[in-house]
Amino acid sequence: MTKAKVTFEDVGVTVTVPAGTRLIEISEKVGAGITYGCREGDCCTCLTNIVSGHENLAAPSLLEDQV
């Protein structure tokens, strides 16, 4: 199984998780405190920066002005 390393810089936590694990789920487990509204990425409340690497969105939902 492919793994991914995720670091939440704000709380200084790095975890290795199965690839495909949703970032919102990881953040809840490590107490990173990402604010969210819908848990699906549609409302963009959880919008965050990826410092390195990339995220494969299952269903991209960015608004036109966010692309």
Image (spheres, grey):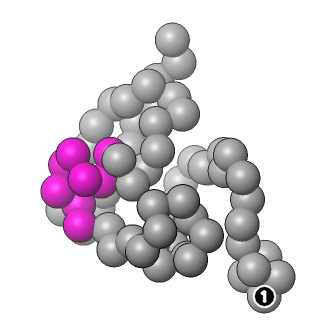
Q: Closest to the observer: 9 or 41?
A: 41
Location of residue 3 with respect to 45 vertically, above or below = above
Left or right: residue 58 versus residue 19 is right
Residue beneath the point at 32% across and 45% down: 26
Q: Where is mark 1, residue-wise? A: 65
Tell me what residue is drawn at x 78 percent, y 88 percent. 65
Indicate whether residue 27 is drawn in magenta. yes
In which image quadrant can residue 9 be found?
Answer: bottom left
SS type, badge 1:
helix
Label 1: how many residues lie within 10 Å, few (<14), some (14-19) or many (20+)?
few
Q: In which quarter of the image is the C terminus?
A: bottom right
- Is 20 positioned to the left or the right of 7 in the image? right
- Secondary structure mainly formed by the magenta segment: helix
Residue 39, how many percent across, how many down?
Answer: 45, 61
Range of magenta residues: 26-33
- When asked about the image quadrant of residue 32, the answer is bottom left
